[in-house]
Amino acid sequence: MNRSNFIKNKLIDTRKHTEKICEPLEIEDYVPQPVVDVSPPKWHLAHTTWFFETFVLIPYFKDYHVYNDDFAFLFNSYYNNAGDRVLRPNRGLMTRPPVREVMAYRKYVTEKCLALIETLPSDGILDIIEIGINHEQQHQELLVYDIKFIFGNQPTFPIYGSGFDLQKEEEKGFLSFKAGLKQIGAAGEAFCFDNELGQHQVYIQDFEIAQNLVTNGEYLEFIQSGGYTDFNLWLSEGWDFIQKEDLKAPLYWFEKNGDWYNYTLRGFEKIDHSLPVQHVSFYEAYAFAEWKGVRLPTEFEWEVAADQLNWGQLWEWTYSAYLPYPGFKKAPGALGEYNGKFMSNQNVLRGASVATPEGHSRKTYRNFFHASSRWLFSGIRLAK
Amino acid sequence: MNRSNFIKNKLIDTRKHTEKICEPLEIEDYVPQPVVDVSPPKWHLAHTTWFFETFVLIPYFKDYHVYNDDFAFLFNSYYNNAGDRVLRPNRGLMTRPPVREVMAYRKYVTEKCLALIETLPSDGILDIIEIGINHEQQHQELLVYDIKFIFGNQPTFPIYGSGFDLQKEEEKGFLSFKAGLKQIGAAGEAFCFDNELGQHQVYIQDFEIAQNLVTNGEYLEFIQSGGYTDFNLWLSEGWDFIQKEDLKAPLYWFEKNGDWYNYTLRGFEKIDHSLPVQHVSFYEAYAFAEWKGVRLPTEFEWEVAADQLNWGQLWEWTYSAYLPYPGFKKAPGALGEYNGKFMSNQNVLRGASVATPEGHSRKTYRNFFHASSRWLFSGIRLAK
Amino acid sequence: MNRSNFIKNKLIDTRKHTEKICEPLEIEDYVPQPVVDVSPPKWHLAHTTWFFETFVLIPYFKDYHVYNDDFAFLFNSYYNNAGDRVLRPNRGLMTRPPVREVMAYRKYVTEKCLALIETLPSDGILDIIEIGINHEQQHQELLVYDIKFIFGNQPTFPIYGSGFDLQKEEEKGFLSFKAGLKQIGAAGEAFCFDNELGQHQVYIQDFEIAQNLVTNGEYLEFIQSGGYTDFNLWLSEGWDFIQKEDLKAPLYWFEKNGDWYNYTLRGFEKIDHSLPVQHVSFYEAYAFAEWKGVRLPTEFEWEVAADQLNWGQLWEWTYSAYLPYPGFKKAPGALGEYNGKFMSNQNVLRGASVATPEGHSRKTYRNFFHASSRWLFSGIRLAK
Amino acid sequence: MNRSNFIKNKLIDTRKHTEKICEPLEIEDYVPQPVVDVSPPKWHLAHTTWFFETFVLIPYFKDYHVYNDDFAFLFNSYYNNAGDRVLRPNRGLMTRPPVREVMAYRKYVTEKCLALIETLPSDGILDIIEIGINHEQQHQELLVYDIKFIFGNQPTFPIYGSGFDLQKEEEKGFLSFKAGLKQIGAAGEAFCFDNELGQHQVYIQDFEIAQNLVTNGEYLEFIQSGGYTDFNLWLSEGWDFIQKEDLKAPLYWFEKNGDWYNYTLRGFEKIDHSLPVQHVSFYEAYAFAEWKGVRLPTEFEWEVAADQLNWGQLWEWTYSAYLPYPGFKKAPGALGEYNGKFMSNQNVLRGASVATPEGHSRKTYRNFFHASSRWLFSGIRLAK
């Protein structure tokens, strides 16, 4: 299959998959933005479309007729170079256009993109379409997080359904690695983001890394042995965070009459001790490791060990800051805002989760969130 | 027509009218709560229904089957005596139940109430149904305010339609009244709220009151002569308020290339100088009066003059605090929370507005809002 | 004694008394502003001096040499007409000028004022000096409140000393008054503020008013019977206030091993049941009255009853909003900002307190604070 | 000189030097805490003393009599293991004990420590005294920052005096280094903090590093060419930061009639183009480097180059997160809270400043602040 065909099929599949994720939603579910980090599903549907329109169709589709002039303002996320935009905290106020019009916008833009691909465009144009596909895949994952957050904050805890279920984790001990110079980063033959590029050597000390994720059962022990009340286990900002937010367990956990429950996409359920613990912040992952007398891996250790590890259920917090690789260069123009400008005060997560779309994970992938984020599908792997 | 029939017809009309107000809405428009004071239309639909269920059906309908046990928690507003409730700022997060289920809930409760009326219930029960009707009428007016706010905060300014249009006001001079003891308050033969009751004498000094509301044209002069920049015209908290919010004109006013526009339910329009100025806070009304060298009336002056005045386009700010009349007594139980507990730090408005439902206005009516509120249908009448 | 002599002696006494209040302070105590409402003692010393310099010396003292050009900016409080000023929350940052220089500034300005009085100035000038004296007396009272707040927020609770002690209150029952037209307000022969002027008739209903203030003992009963946990007793904003601030007792009260203590200017002491309860907000006064099944008086009832009452220990909250009397006119220029611009969202207190300077109290005096204020010397008198 | 003597002399010098820094202060200057990061000078004087009392005297001085039982609560900073403490934002409210008593406390504790040293204590005890000395040296530097902040926020900009003056910087080009494995960290023979320990290999790519700091003149060019208005130069959080704080220049810079001035410890002065730019946040340092088309060094590059560089005027922002070195272990007990718990969301600065006490700088020293901090003595060195 040639590249055009590959991109075409991937585009079709990706656009469909986004809409499939939304199938269990009521129209009302598409609207709210309960906290600033959680965007309305409608906004994801429109923004991923705006991305193709702005970066592919407007520059490269001959005589392209913009679907609606207002949408550039409404659905730009953070690209300062692409003009003014609705302020992020106001996304939940936009009731118009309604969902059905966003769906029509999606259809229009998808069709134009497919028509453009039929013209056998240059590799440069295909590259941008491929970025658009990967961009939409990232939003697919955020969409699942955000739907779960919207549902999990309903007093009635509605059921979403299956499709993002976790598998059991079992205690399997640690793997050992010897110190030495290791190759880190992507060579760039296959698709990857700019933040992975620049394969380079890193010297790594001897280390051991766990073969499994921490389970709910182990995390419950941490809670029950006073983990959330012993300041010695916590980073200073982590301790302040759990005090201020009055946290006593992972997100979506609830205690009732001495038993622990959690909200999952399948509904309100008793905690299953054998599943990996999910929805922890970096701060909680750090404190858990302290309590165990071990530590979290660095992102480099993780990448070195990746081929020998079983990963992909949950994103794994590392104790590495999200910083540029040596020689990192931003892309020119608006796409240069994709990654580089976020390289401060965030932590790297490695791996993938059950919400990561197929074909969107690789061992060099650098995901990043603030240390206090909990609504993502995050988990804990230990190292020492 | 006997009282039962009267109440029955009024109930039917009122329930229908609420839904009619919502007809121009998309489902998405029912969801958001852009600021804490503005409730989602869906919430109004459900809360007015919950009121009948809680105060009429549950206590008085034999073997009443509650529509949904969760709704008491979801749709209680501020009645502490009626149990726990969703926190006010979180109303916009409730995507479930969807609108269609709220409509089914409305239908169920209306039918049960009508069935109860058919049983020829006691006057006491009819009294509570009548309170429920008046309660829903108050929410009809808020619903119009809130829809306008939701629409007026869309970057695309959608059109709602007609039905709440203002008429011209014309300069007609002041009417004079002589000092003396005047009767204030409602005698209580017809329906009224507890805060109007307790007819009593108030000694009033000589005063004059304008026969017309202040117009957009006059208010524009105030703006253009520097009204928003001269601290001497403002109450201290009013000055702080306009500084902090960076206000330069009434709500929904926008300056573009030296011309002034406003958002109305008919869309984005050029300011019409002959219409009464709308969407001003008490602070702005006060400053305007200072600028004119006059003042706002007290609520007592307004009531004394009411029969000789043309009113009903916009609620009129008075320079009276919302305080209890002599001998004021709260009703027992949850309904006692209706009015009395709000008697601090609010200003009385008198009259009615184009959004006030038919049959819901009278000269003794005491409306009340915080001095900084602007999203209500408020206007200015001068006195001296 | 002629007026010049009277003013001269009063000026000397007033200026001395301010400094006497500060005698027990360490230099360090003059600096902090623990909350925005509480000003540093040094600031009071300088601001009352600035008032004389700005409103008396600069306009009326021939060839007056301003003590320091910076001080107008540093020590203006809220007079917009008198130029820019240090923002209120930043008063506690001003370590310079040091206290000794403020004292020199005081001396300089006092001497110049006395010299001006020696020139036998016009009555108009003496009027302004008299305002300055009364202004300083108001600050003397605030100074006591603020010193108590600064001391009471030290972990070590330092002792200030005696001089502002309360006397016992005893249950004496209610006095009855008949309805009728009553004369309210000051005639203006003796000194009074503009907000008291405009003697006018008010029609008052039959009422009864307590002959004593509520005691600590009674208030403790209110606390112990669950007063702070029964929302039915509270105004809605009062309930929100005590929830948000987590209040369970008056300011400066502390529970330790089941006993109640309070911080007084004499130190940390066990609650004396026979003293009047002090440091309650209007909200708490209101809730206490609700609990007793009675109410607070209006400011008009209070004034009618004043001659038959024993008052002066603590300012007494009334259920009257601070609003202008009929025909109220602000003074022209900066002094017009003294009272009128604060006439929104404040409650009137009547009477006086042990911290009120001699000669500064009268039955027409209208003191005013926000309903949530607690650091003033406030108490509760009941009515029905 | 044996170790005891060395420590004894260093202790004497250090204790004296802290007090010398405070000589130009008025008593009033010791009190305020203008922002949460800036502590009152009095607090530094007492806290450094509390440190010796808590970690040296109480555990090791036989029959030690605590100076004042309250001081543990008043002057603990962030050591959770050492008991409750005054909340950080409230340090500026503590007017008591007065400065003279804090000085007496210092004297008492210094004498006891010297007496302890005379007993020829174990190396372990000397180690802790040495930590106390280094701890006090760190506070000496903070004291200078905080005094400058307190003075620089007085409307009258008082003069502190000389002693912390900067020298000219001159453009000297870049030094080049070859890629390779480098030794990083302290071996621990001489005193160092735990965060420097664990000498280890790091692989570093080819790099170049500037031989001089960026000057005010160069930074002014950045400002004048629109550096603070071009979002492409800024990290996303940096851009939000300068928008929110409305920043247009380094801290203490002021524009007046088109000229730039800054507040220095010598007073309010015209910007000297040849001095190194001071008081920039990491975000500003990053944006400046972007504007120049280069970057900031990593902390490892800095350490590799340190011996060939001229440093010590200002702390130099690196683009390295403050993270643990391989094998990092916290000390047991309260001293374990010294460094490790701050290892999140902070940036490393390397070098030293004119406010760093003599003998307190070394090339392995890892200083750390939040990316938005500006009141420290920070500057910019470029790399590529």
Image (cartoon, coloured by chain):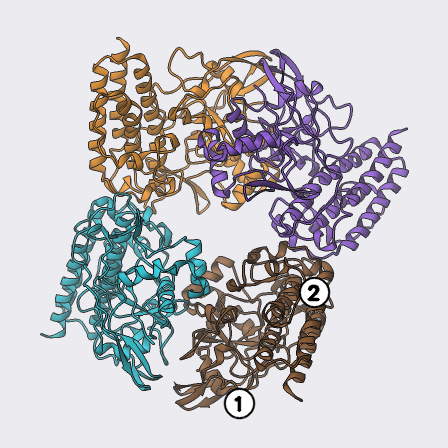
Chain colours: A cyan, B orange, C purple, D brown
The chain that hosts pointer 2 is: D
Quadrant in which residue D52 is drawn: bottom right
Task: Calculate the distance from the C-alpha at mark 2 to the C-alpha at mark 1.
Answer: 44 Å
Position of A310 relative to C124 (above/below): below
Count residues near mark 1 (Cα–Cα under 10 Å), then give few for <14, some for 14-19, many for 20+. few
D28 and A224: which one is in front? A224
Q: Quadrant of the N terminus of chain C?
A: top right
Tell me the residue at 62%/82% (across/down): D359
Q: Is residue C68 left or right of residue C338?
A: right
State the image coordinates of residue B96 (x, y, percent, origin top left).
24, 42
State the image coordinates of residue C69 (x, y, percent, origin top left).
75, 53
- The mark that comes first in sequence, 2 or 1, is 2
State the image coordinates of residue B373 (x, y, percent, origin top left).
46, 35
Residue C325 appearing in the image: yes
Count residues near mark 2 (Cα–Cα under 10 Å), then give few for <14, some for 14-19, many for 20+. many
Which residue carries the number 2 mark? D105
Say which mark, if any, is on residue B165.
Answer: none
State the image coordinates of residue B6 (x, y, percent, origin top left).
27, 13
Which residue carries the number 1 mark? D308
